[in-house]
Amino acid sequence: MKRVELSGWNEVEDVRRLVTCVPKLVWLDVGKRTNGAPVATSSASANLAEWLTVLSPLAELTTLHGVRLLYEVSATDTTSAVSLSERSRLRKNGEIASTLVWKSAKLRRVDHWEEGAGKVVVLVRDGEKARYEVRTVKV
């Protein structure tokens, strides 16, 4: 089995059990979190370390949907005038992208921080470095 789409999940442990059953997944959509836990819009929606542990057995994973791992930012252009807090979130997103590339070698597409915006985050590898790009997709 290469692709799994869930309608939702309650606890990260649910996804962890799924991953152990199908370690050759290439595409994983975990759907929406169904336990109603509040999600802060200004911070990364998921615990990165926890999700990296869950996803580590998936050596072939290229696409992950249903978990927002990056911080919400209004602009991705670091050359424009942005606030210090915005610049900090941009820097953190760069660090998260690097960590994702390091831990999940084939992962290249994750959810954008705006739900339903028709955008995805693409992880780009530049030799030893990694960065992320926001791209529009057809919905």
Image (cartoon, rainbow, N blue to C red):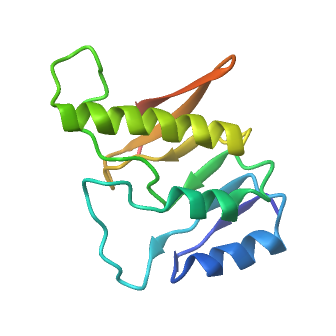
Q: In the figure, 111 relative to 86: above or below?
A: below
Q: Quadrant of residue 11?
A: bottom right
Residue 115 is situated, as x and y percent measured from the top left of the image, at 33, 55
Residue 77 position in % (x across, y down):
29, 21
Q: Residue at x 27, y 63 (%)?
A: 40
- Looking at the image, residue 57 sits to the left or right of residue 33; the answer is right
Q: Nearer the viewer, residue 91 or 27?
A: 91
In percent of width and height, residue 62 lies at 68, 44
The part of the image, by quadrant, that contains residue 18 is bottom right
- Residue appearing at x 42%, y 38% in the figure: 93
Q: How many marks?
A: 0
Query: Is residue 108 something one can see in this rendering?
Result: no
Q: Is residue 29 above or below residue 77?
A: below
The location of residue 21, given as percent across then percent down, is: 82, 74
- Please tell me whether residue 47 is drawn above or below residue 117 in the rendered image: below
Residue 14 visible somewhere in the drawing: yes
Residue at the location (15% across, 30% down)?
83
Relative vertical location of residue 74 with respect to residue 37 in this rendering, above or below = above
What's the residue at 34%, 33% (across, down)?
90
Pick the quarter of the image with the N terminus: bottom right
56 or 119: nearer the eye?
56
